[in-house]
Amino acid sequence: MGLLRYTIYRLIQTIPVLIGISIITFLLANLGPGDPVRLMLQGVEHDEEMIRTIEQRYGLDRPLHERYITYMAGVVQGDLGHSIHRNRSVSDLVLHRAGPTLFLVLSAYAFALATAIPLGIIAAKRRNEPTDHVSRIVALIGVSTPSFWIGIMLILIFAVTLGVLPSSGLVYPWRPPDSYGYSNHLELWYHSLRYLLLPMIALGTLQMATLMRVERTQMIESLQGEYVKLARAYGVPERTILRKHAFQVAQLPIITIVGLNLSTAIGGAVLIEMVFNINGMGRLFIEAIAQNDYQVVMGLTMVLGTLFVIGVVITDIAYAYIDPRVTYGEEE
Amino acid sequence: MARKQFDITRRNLLASGAAVSAAAIAGCIGGENGETDDGADDADPGGNGDSAVFHFTQEQSRAEDFDPVIANDAYSAQVYGLVFDGLYEWGEGLELEPKVATGEPDVEDDGRRFMFEIHEGIEFHNGDELTASDVAHSFLAPVEEETENAASYDMIESAEPIDDYQLEVNLEEPYGPFELQTMAVTISPEEARTDDRDAFNTDPIGSGPYTFEDFSENEYVELERWDDYWDDEMEEPNIESVTFVAHDDDAGRISDIRAGETDAIAGIPNDDWDVLEGEDNVEVHRAESPSYMYLAFNCNEGGTTDPDVRRAIAHSFDMESFVNEHAEHTADPMTNPIPPTVNEVWGFPEDEYGEMLPEYDPEEAEALLDESDAVDDDWEPIIITPEGIRASLAERIATRLGEIGYGAEVNVLDFGQLVETYNTGDADDYEMYLLGWTGGPDPDFYLYSLFHESQAGVNQGHFYEGSDGFHDAIAEGRTTADQDERYEIYEPVIEEIVEELPALAAFTQHNTMASGDHVEGLEVHPNVQTNPNLISYHTNVSLQ
């Protein structure tokens, strides 16, 4: 099987997975406790007739299977339903919120990779030296500390006490500078970075710590490999060994972790968006759950589930592409 | 091929990593000395760079409905309240003052007909004149379009303009709260609104002191001062531009005001009150609100159907000390279902009710429970509650009941589950529940919605049967507009509630705000929708 056929095969495999996600999500959202209409009318004088009218308006009076079929018919056409609480198309809501979340998550990954890989290499190269000990302690703290707590601490230090960075919100670099009152793109990017810095670090720390531990372990393993010893015996400079022979092989597990940790990162983004008041999908998720806005919960779960499945598929494909030892499913 | 690709990726990765690191350092260095975003306009997530721009952080996200006909969340109302005018508006307290109306209405036909006269020459922001037909539309549209606000206007039989500046409104029956609440209708331009309702909802056109300028869903709303505002009796607003953002996270909001990211925040948690009060550059504010938190008893099934059991629960713990411990700065204990700020207008004998309420007396509580046939010796009722201070109160009751040989099972439910459960009347679901209600300035909002039999299983789950005439009196109270007459009708009803305890009044929560010390003239209004109260006949907030 060639790479293209393998890719298509993996993509086709995602279809039953996504259908499974949709059924489970739909059942959980609809059979779970909580009545969205009563919740919407809480605090307003109402009667049973008004409840029935609203249920009828949103099709909530129809049998579950009918609602599922109608819902899925919409989903395949890109219509994720209509938010009861917000009176908006869920697709529009999700699209509107996807940018900030992706911006945050990708930045956090960039931060994690940019810091974890060099630190992991240094720790491996100086194994059991003070530098290694420090990096391992930092990684341990990073892995064991909840991201929202890191976020709150960063706000207290850098925003409240030192007053050098903003405590909430984001400036989006894709918007025109004048929408924020900035005169040029340089100013926009500068402010965008200032607003991004704290949430990015708060969200990226866990990824950074995880990646650094794996990078260190893999690099140590690589540096002890027979091929490295052979290279050394041939007199290949240590720098070249590190860069070309050890480093390259050590990156395969990193790719896996980056792909599979996507869901962890998005989960972390939910909390970070609440702490830093970022209007992304995570915050929308929390609000929708609190409001029993089940169409939004379902829409977001479908989108996030799809993103996760795509992440896994891309990881698989990238793995197969990079590592010649990975087979495409032919006879073994 | 694969190796080449990998090399390129790695280099790019390291290069981008270096760029991020360098930029991060630049960002850290660049923001020193508490620099704010001078030059940034209101869309900036940050705050106080401009003395004419007021940046306000709301305590909960808006539903983003800015059409007054369909909007029913307080946080959207805080925004559109500055964009629209009401026929009448709230003054410094919960009393209505004429705004678009020239004065009090002429009331005819035993309180069934109201004749309104409105000011001439009022213009909406699109240049159209505000006429009596717009007022009629504003009264009728919620019912005609079956919006969630329909119940507030469904007593209106007809609203017909007599000419451009006079309107006749007929009610099916006299309706007590009409003059205290319904007349506060917000006036929308009929033509612009019905032309494209969806567009109007996100880009509303009013006749108020601010225009709706810019909006990014769930991020910010920006309003601009309307320099051609019609009302010459009111000063020109000092604030040129207002930006609303919402920050649901308590800790985040507190950080925002402490870091100077915003000019004012709403909703100060009790535990943060002292912290903010101790800040040099922050001022805290509060006002009583018409809110009523209560502990309701299941009078339909279970042990709490016995009034002595309900009294025993009330004897078993000390509400006042609980409120002082958990909400010293943000709430006050209550004695009856009418919030103190509403009672300022009505004058019900609160002190007498206080004396009638069972005081903290665990021995009496134990004796009453021991004597009651409705409960066993090992009775452990279920209390359902939302999280937060009400869950703490439920835990306190359970602890105190435990101390006298009984107990309670506290089920903290998410709000969605709670509203589905608290009105089943099933003792297996609950024997007590804790909830709250924020109404208007009329006792009807608390008595009818929370105690009338028609609301059993809908808005109330105590199913209290009451004495002969209890429910009739509540219904009768809304059919007359005469306040003295209504006082006489309501007073025995309230007394019965305090005596028989279908619900024990717990506390009233305050509206709270914190502002930077550069904000002058900011006062919290009891009506949460009226906050931030930037401009009125009584106030004109400014930034120094």
Image (spheres, grey):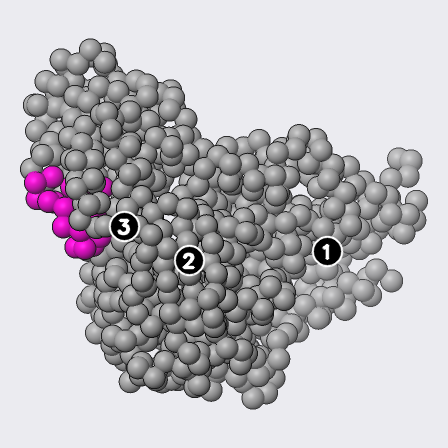
Instruction: Measure the alpha-carbon separation of dots 1 and 2.
Output: 82 Å
Question: Cα distance, mark 1 to mark 3?
Answer: 84 Å
Q: Is residue B464 magenta?
A: no
| Label ID, residue B399 | none
Provide the secondary structure element on which disc 1 rests. Answer: helix
Query: Does any portion of residue A185 appear in the rendered image?
Result: yes
Residue at 22% x, 57% y is B288
Residue B352: say if magenta.
yes
Q: Which residue is at the far bottom?
A: A183
What residue type is disc 2 on?
A: Val
Range of magenta residues: B333-353
Instruction: Please identify, in this view, whether the residue under mark 1 or under mark 2 is nearer the observer.
Output: 2
> In the image, B422: left or right of A198?
left
Q: Is residue B296 visible?
A: no
**What residue would you read off at disc 3?**
B481
Q: Quadrant of the N terminus of chain B?
A: bottom right
**Do the numbered discs 1 and 3 sit on residues whose CB atoms are within 8 Å?**
no
* Place of residue B336 in the rendered image (x, y in percent of width and height, measured from the top left): 18, 41
Which residue is the site of mark 2? B169
Q: Which residue is farthest front?
A: B109
Q: Which badge, 3 or 2, comes first in the chain's sequence? A: 2
Please give the label number shown on residue A249: 1
Q: Residue at x 61, y 70 (%)?
A: B17
